[in-house]
Image: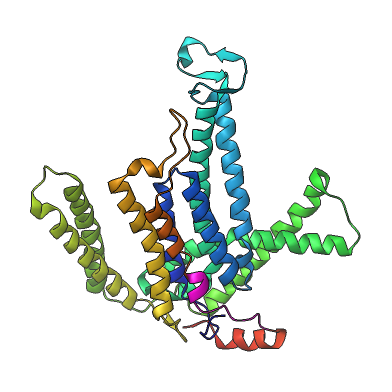
Amino acid sequence: MSPLLPRAVHPAAWWGWAIGLAIAVSTVNNPFLLFTALGVAALVVTSRRGSSPWAKSFRLYLWLGVFIVGVRTLLHVLVGLKFGETIVLPLPEVRLPSWAAGIDILGDVRLEGLLAAVTDGLRLAVMIACIGAANSLANPKRLLRSLPGALSEIGSAVVVTITVAPQLAESVQRVMRARALRGDTARGVRALPRIALPVLEDTLDRSLLLASAMDSRGYGRRREVTSAQRQVTATCTLGGLLASAVGIYGILDATTPDWLGAPVLAVGIALSLTGIWLGGRANARSTYRPDPWRWPEWLTVASGLAAAVAVHLVARGDAASLGMQVSPLAVPALPLIAVAGFLVAALPAFLTPTPPAPATRGQARVVAAGTGVAA
C-alpha cells in the first residue's frame, strides 16, 4: 500500500511517461519486449487510473490495436511480400496486368513473412496502447489548465480531439443502458439506427455544455495588446521556428558548419520560448489551485525515459536483439537491459499516489464549484 496521500498525478507527467514508453517501443520488433511494454502499460493503467469517464478508454485502444494487427495480417495475405520457406497456407496466386507489375494477389502464405507482418502490426498496436494509457491516466481538463497561456487555444483543440473517443464510448453505454431499461433488447445491425441517433444527440449536447463551461471560465478571452507587442511576439515565434528548423538541419547534415547546428537550434528554442511567454501575457486566463509537481511526477517522467534510454543503449550495442530474426527463423533474443528499462517504467504503478476515491453526488457539486479555471 502506498504511504502517499491519495491525489491525482500531474497529467503532463503521465504524458511524459507514455511518450518515453512509446519512443522505446517504436524501435522494437521483438515480441517479448513488445508484450512486456504492453503489460507495463496495462499494469500502470489498472493501478493508477481514476474514476473519470476517459479512464475507461484503455480497453478501446486495446481493441484498436487488435484491429490494426488483424488488418496488417490480412493485407499481408492479400498483397504482401511472401518470403520464407515454411508454407502455412497454400493459396492460388493472381498476377495483375503489366500496369500493376510487381503486385500479386494472394499466393502461398509463408510462416516467416507472416510473423514479420504480425510483429510490425503489434509494434504499432503497442504504441497506440501507450498513448491510450496516457489518455486513460491523465485528466485532459487538468492538462489544459497546465498549458502555457499562449498554447491554450491549441491545447483546447487537442483536448477536445483526444476526449472524443471516451465520451463517445460513455454515450453508447448510456444509450444502451436506457434501451435495456425500456425492454429493448435488439442487438447487432438492427439496433444500429436506434443507437446512432441518440448517441449523436447526446454527443452534441455534451459538446455544447463543454463549450458553455469553457466560455464561462474565460477560455478564448484576451487582454488588450499594442501593435508593437503583437509584432514582437510574432517575430520571436516565427524567428524561433525558422532558427529551430535550420538548427535541426545543421545537426542532421554532417557537411554543414558546426555553428549551424546546436548553436542555431539553441537560439531558435530561446526565441520560441520567448514568443510563448509574450503570447501568454496577452491571455486573460488564470488558474485556480494549480496541480503540484513533486517527486512522484519526476519519478513518473524519469521511468518512461528510462525505457527509451535502455532501448537506445541496446540499439547501439546489439540492434539485432531488438528485432525478430525471420530469415532463418529463430527464437527472439531477450536483451536484459531493455527488459530492465521496461520494468523501470512500471514503477509508477507502485510508487506514485493512488488516485482519489470517486466523489459522491454531494461532494461532486462541491468539487465542481471549487475547481476549474477562473477568468
Magenta-span inclusion, residue 356? yes
Which image quarter: residue 60?
bottom right
Return the x and y of residue 50 as percentages of the image width and height: 60, 73
- 172 left or right of 232? right
Name the image quarter holding the N terminus: bottom right
For the image, the number of numbered tags is 0
The answer to whether residue 284 of the structure is visible from this angle is no
Magenta-highlighted stretch: main secondary structure? Answer: loop
Question: As displayed, is residue 116 above or below residue 223?
Answer: above
The residue nearer to you, when weighing 142 against 300, is: 300
Which image quarter: residue 234?
bottom left
- 152 left or right of 200? left
Question: As displayed, is residue 259 above or below residue 153?
Answer: above
Return the x and y of residue 113 as percentages of the image width and height: 50, 28
Magenta-span inclusion, residue 353? yes
The answer to whether residue 130 of the structure is visible from this angle is yes
